[in-house]
Image: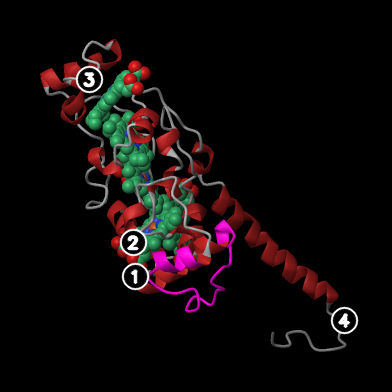
Amino acid sequence: MPQIFPRGANLVPLKIVLVLAVLGSAVPAAMWYYWTPKYTKIGYQPAQPVPFSHKIHAGQLGIDCRYCHSFVDSAAHSNIPTAQVCMNCHSQVQRDNPKLEPVRRAFATGEAIQWVQIHKTPDHAYFNHAVHINRGVSCVSCHGRVDQMDEVYQAESFAMKFCLDCHRAPENGLRPLDKVTDLGWTPPTKSSELAALLGTTPEKLKLKPDATLSPANAQKIMGNHFKDLRGVHPPDSNCAGCHR
Ligand code: HEC
Ligand code: HEC
Ligand code: HEC
Ligand code: HEC
Ligand code: HEC
């Protein structure tokens, strides 16, 4: 810190004025940061035309997210599956279940099922799914445990702070590419197993071979490894990275 105030001079009143000036601008900035409208959208769970359960399909039946959300790793927007995808199974399974009537009707007429969209970023913020998925960011980081939800609800705020918190410390959100849709997966906490997963040795990670790590520490070590390996550098102070 450079010496701003000369030693000895009684500048307390000036200091107070300066502090107030800083607070005066910091408080509205903080409100802006935390109170963006979406912050209150956590838990948003609109009624859907078909009571489709992710808990049954993604959880119990273990269908991979990409079987239905097939564009999520190749396009900016993820897609909602057409009735055709449902009918791959439901032309055989649960053929008479009245809950599936809108699916059968949509399939017969070719009209889309009117699903209600839950997650939405405003037009002035750019988002791209494929970039995140292909760098090893799991759906769970942004959507929570969808595989345990009977009805999907919004799990995270999607306020600017939510995006920036990860962009400033992406090591907390990186994992092996083949675990991105495995929402319950966490890295091994035994140092030898973690090293093996990363194709290295505990010594090279500066760990004892028989150490047991906390889950948060295991994530950090793994995340930093992938951050370097994949050259990950998400936009944070560059406003145009997200506002284009
Ligand atoms: C890979 C096969 C498969 C696909 C694809 C599939 N389902 Fe299912 N679905 C099942 C099975 C199996 C069951 C029965 C589960 C049970 O009884 O525990 C089921 C059950 C259901 C039920 C009944 C749940 C209940 O509580 O009665 C609904 C509604 C449903 N599916 C909707 C859909 C919709 C909508 C789609 C498309 C977005 C879809 N399914 C795609 C296999 C599938
Ligand atoms: C069998 C097909 C199927 C599978 C498998 C599936 N989904 Fe979905 N998903 C849907 C359908 C249909 C909807 C629209 C209805 C709803 O919101 O529940 C949807 C909606 C969603 C939404 C909310 C979209 C919005 O409107 O904002 C998210 C998030 C989501 N899925 C994530 C996942 C994740 C993560 C997985 C894997 C763990 C997954 N889905 C697996 C069919 C599927
Ligand atoms: C880094 C955060 C992040 C990750 C990771 C992520 N999503 Fe999303 N998801 C979003 C945001 C933000 C939206 C709202 C998109 C918009 O407004 O265009 C969204 C919307 C969706 C939607 C609604 C359709 C759409 O694109 O608008 C579906 C379905 C979905 N996500 C599924 C998934 C699945 C499946 C995965 C994992 C394979 C996943 N998401 C991973 C942030 C994420
Ligand atoms: C859990 C971590 C995480 C979260 C949450 C997250 N991101 Fe990212 N984001 C990343 C990573 C990792 C990258 C890839 C950076 C790279 O390739 O160098 C990235 C890249 C981006 C990029 C650059 C894409 C490009 O084409 O250059 C944009 C824009 C972006 N994110 C927007 C968002 C927005 C908007 C949100 C909030 C809705 C968000 N991100 C939430 C981790 C995250
Ligand atoms: C990682 C992506 C990301 C970066 C980088 C980013 N923003 Fe944002 N910003 C967002 C998202 C997402 C929203 C929408 C939040 C919401 O829906 O509430 C947003 C919203 C805003 C808003 C509107 C506030 C509101 O009430 O919706 C302003 C103004 C803004 N950002 C300014 C900035 C400035 C200035 C910078 C550079 C210092 C910046 N942003 C950097 C993602 C980003």
* Residue name at image x 36 percent, y 28 percent: 56
Q: Residues within 10 Å of mark 4 (few under 14, many from 20)?
A: few
* Residue name at image x 56 percent, y 57 percent: 215
User: Residue placed farthest to the left in the image?
Assistant: 109
Task: Residue 9: give x, y in percent of width and height.
Answer: 86, 86
Closer-to-camera residue (32/154): 154
Q: Earlier in the sequence, mark 1 or mark 4?
A: 4
- Circle on res. 67: none
Task: Residue 93: give x, y in percent of width and height.
Answer: 22, 20
Residue type (three-letter) at the residue carrying disc 4 = Asn
Q: Is mark 1 within 8 Å of ligand 4?
A: yes
Q: Residues within 10 Å of mark 3 (few under 14, many from 20)?
A: few
The C terminus sits in image quarter: bottom left
Q: Is mark 3 within 8 Å of ligand 1?
A: yes
Q: Which residues are magenta?
A: 192-216
Q: Is mark 2 within 8 Å of ligand 4?
A: yes
Q: Which residue is mark 3?
A: 93
